[in-house]
Image: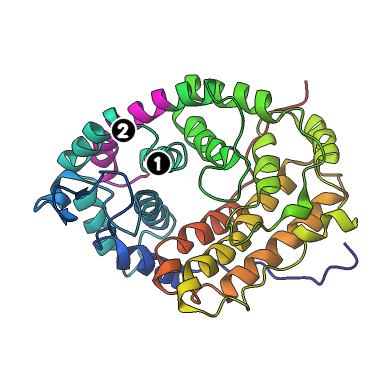
Amino acid sequence: MKSLTPVNSPVFTAEQANTLAAWPLSCMDHPQPPPEGDQYLWDYASKPRLDSDYDKTHAFYSCYDWHSAVNSSWAMVALLKDFPNLPLASLLHEKLTDHLGQKNIAGEVEFFKEAKGFEKPYGYAWLLKLYAEIKTWNDPAAAKLASNLQPLAELFSAKLIEFFDHLPYATRVGVHPNTALSMTLVLDYANTTSDTKLKDAVLRNASRLFGKDEHCPTWFEPGGTEFLSPCLAEAQLMAHTMDRTAYAHWLSKFLPPLYSPEFQPLVQPVDISRLQNPEELAGKSHLIGLAFHRAFAIAAIADALPPSDPRAAALRTLSKRDASSGFAALSEAGYMGSHWLGTYALLYLRASHHDPPTYPQSR
């Protein structure tokens, strides 16, 4: 703690919120490019083409890929909840109403009834988090939007229970298939909506898959241009599965001491200076996102520790430092970053400016 330079928390102001709101708005009506393999949006009968009514039969057809369209929608709702008088508020409302219409969601339900692994579990988790955000939104439009989304949320909840219960091994990577991050997002939804069946499935499988883990290989991080920290994602998830005392003990076996050389890969700021080729913008955006994911996860880990644990203060300082580096680079990846990075910045900002979550109590 003595070696860390103090860092001020990024300020979450209405002006900053308006800037973050502009980013999802800029991508919400941009159809996704033709993907490789899936048939979600594009027809491949001859050459890739969009159906003429794609915007009436799909809800999440924009923002480069499906999960980014979903988490951009979540960001819009979250900003409206926290800053209902934003200058962009009316446009945010308009886009949410257009994209989350009943017919659009019905088209999503029909597609996902037969979809196999498409967007599972990461996209599913974000959809459920979006639904929970709308369910707790005190706005005249919220009840209708939640009603529209409910069939898709129920379908995803049932599919995720089956998915987690039959998952033989956890996926510990720094990109979308990461099991721990999806479980954390799903728990946010389950706690908000009292979906006890899905919550129980997540908790029992988190304990099964991660409960005995020790000595996370921090020296593997960061992995290339990945946007998640596998070690921190798991540590954040496991805070939800045990009381503070038990969690502090588990964390001591899972992560090395903060002052040790083994912890240094999680302390060093993310370096994007070598990614200068325009073709590397996707990788650059991922590394900027990694700074925000670290900040988000570390803040949650600190909140889960007993108040007297000396690691908590140091972790909060590290969280602020990671967030500051993320904000300093936020606009450096162009559209490859703007279609999703605001969401991860907002995950951190909301977590760091709200009351800490409730964790299991000591028995």
Spot occupied by residue 32 in the image (x, y as percentages of width and height):
28, 58
In the rendered view, does 308 fall on the left or right side of 29?
right
In this image, 146 relative to 180: left or right?
Answer: left
Number of on-image labels: 2
- Measured from the top left, where is residue 313 in percent x and y? 81, 55
Task: Report the side of 46 relative to 330 (left or right).
Answer: left
SS at mark 2 in the image: loop
Residue 119 numbered tag: 1
Image x and y of residue 219, in percent: 78, 54
Residue at the extreme left of the image, as rendered = 52
**Quarter in which the C terminus is drawn:** top right
Residue 244 visible at all: yes
Residue position marked by numbered label 2 in the rendering: 115
Mark 1: few/some/many CA within 10 Å (<14, 14-19, 20+)? some
Determine whether 226 is above or below 186 in the image: below
Whether pointer 1 and pointer 2 mark residues with C-beta atoms closer than 8 Å, the reply is: yes
Determine if residue 195 is in view: no
Magenta range is: 136-159
Question: How far, Cα to Cα, is label 1 from label 2?
Answer: 9 Å
User: Image height check: is 163 above or below 249?
Assistant: above
Q: Hey, what amino acid is under mark 2?
A: Ala
Q: Can residue 140 be found in the magenta stretch?
A: yes
Amino acid type at mark 1: Glu
